[in-house]
Amino acid sequence: MKKISTPLFCLLFVAGIAFSQFANAQTTSNTQLERGPSGMIRCATPPPPPEWDAWFNAKVEEFKKGLETGKMAVTNYTIPVVVHIIEGGQAVGTFPNLSQAQINSQITVLNQDYSGTGYNTSTYPSTAYTHWATAQALPAANKDANGRVAIANTGIQFCLATKDPSGNVLAEPGIDRVNYTTKGWTNPNSASYNSTTTFMNYIDGTIKPGTIWDPSKYLNMWVTDENSSVGLLGYATFPAGATLTGLSAGGTATTDGFWAYAMAFGSKNICTSGTYDPTYCYGRTCTHEIGHYLGLRHTWGDGTCLTDYCNDTPTESTANYANCPQVYPFNSGTCPSPSNSPDGEMTMNFMDYTNDACMYMFTVDQTSRIQTCMQSGTYRIGLNSSAALLCTTGILENNLSNNISIYPNPSSGDIFMNVNSTTISSADITIFNAIGDAVLQKRVPISSGSAVKFDMINHPDGMYLIQMKTSEGTITKKVILNR
Ligand SMILES: [Zn+2]
């Protein structure tokens, strides 16, 4: 992106103050559907309205206060995923009928990116945003050992659903292949849908309602081809506010989720045999869009130096397509208040617009928004307990299941778990009650042959599900409390 010269920048800034409402709205619509240097539109997720921001930001503040006082903690969540692949009868593995391996590679990218261990995190500069961290008086939790703004582990993981909404085991985990001709639908790459408006209307009005699985149990993703005139990489729905009615911003029962262009889905680092866009080929379109799905705003706040409501992301004048490969600092001094000098803009943040190879981090404040979303967002609240039931029949899991015993069952209070494995060192345990609320959550060390004890003495009689996430998969066991 061309750097704005100082006089022009001042002029824009003054104009922005004089006509802030108008100017912001203009900037929003312009940047939102802007074509980058590659000719593609990075993202078409519409920014939510101020009412949504007010509602959601209040929830985020509650969560952050809870963190400070120890009443809340960053929780590990797993989100079950179904990918609806809209194809025209091509052989599996032939574009746009993507292979299971290419789909799997996207889930691997998401799990790495949302835990802060993704491709190119090792290139994070050694003094990244240390001045910003000091100037903003960021809490210790937002910084790493070197005083940099920390690359966060958001606590979110994704699993491929192994069952459809009727409980049938899927032939291919996480995949729903839909032939548009069988449905009587037009090819999504048809010239009838050659603008973002006509194309998104077709996806939201026909494709999504005709294929969606219960969005309170699955994160729905749609992957299609598109007309070359559209040139869009992805768009998502923000979480609808449970107590807000009449807003068009959030996803609905027929639209909630995320659409991606099939050439921007998966990673050629992991699945080399796929068909990929040359620039957007490491799965970061999906990482970015799911950021919106989980409540994140763009780093420039969808206007000139506006806020994304995160203190640990420096102010940014506009979307960055430049700075790839990365130099640091970049665009220092582009925003006056608060000043991003001398550290510059955070072009490696997933909520900017840089190339896939050059974005690799979420921050701790972004994590607070994501965590709040999992606690308060419509269709997000039940996803984790749904994962316990929907992502559980893999071969590794079956082996794992045979090597884990839970006893006594029924139990009158204490429940013991024994894992017969020399390769598993820890497990993330979540115990759900019969209506799907998590009543206990902790990470436990595993030592083969020794039992782990869970004290359930203060919980009422009834059925509970014990979900165990380990390095060899996730399994769920049923246990009865009966005194
Ligand atoms: Zn976006």
Image (spheres, grey):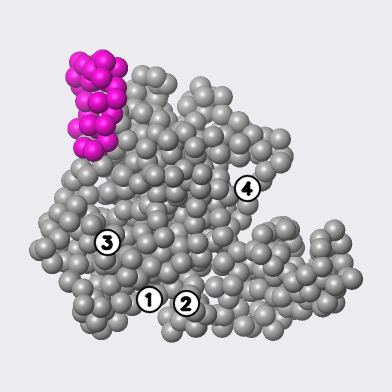
Looking at the image, is 300 positioned above or below residue 286?
above
Q: Residues within 10 Å of mark 4 (few under 14, many from 20)?
A: some
Distance from mark 1 CB to nearest ligand 1 atom below 8 Å: no
Q: Residues within 10 Å of mark 1 (few under 14, many from 20)?
A: many
**Residue plotted at (72% across, 58% down):** 439
The three-letter amino acid code for the residue at tag 2 is Asp
The three-letter amino acid code for the residue at tag 1 is Asp
Tell me how many marks there are: 4
Whole-percent x, y for residue 449 in the image: 81, 76
Q: Which residue is mark 3?
A: 205
**Residue plotted at (71% across, 81% down):** 403
Q: Which residue is mark 2?
A: 164
The three-letter amino acid code for the residue at tag 3 is Gly
From the viewer's perspective, is 416 left or right of 258?
Answer: right
Distance from mark 2 CB to nearest ligand 1 atom below 8 Å: no
Looking at the image, is 371 positioned above or below residue 148?
below
The quadrant in which residue 14 appears is: top left
Q: Residues within 10 Å of mark 3 (few under 14, many from 20)?
A: few
Please identify the quadrant where the N terminus is shown. Answer: top left
Q: In terms of secondary structure, where does tag 2 sit? A: loop
Q: Rounded to the nearest whole Å, what is the CA distance between mark 3 and mark 2?
A: 22 Å
Q: Which residue is mark 4?
A: 74
Q: Rounded to the nearest whole Å, what is the CA distance between mark 4 and mark 2?
A: 30 Å
Q: In terms of secondary structure, where does tag 1 sit? A: strand
The three-letter amino acid code for the residue at tag 4 is Val
Instruction: Looking at the image, tell me whether mark 3 or mark 2 is earlier in sequence order.
Output: 2
Q: Nearer the viewer, residue 296 or 102?
A: 296
Instruction: Looking at the image, tell me whether mark 4 or mark 1 is earlier in sequence order.
Output: 4
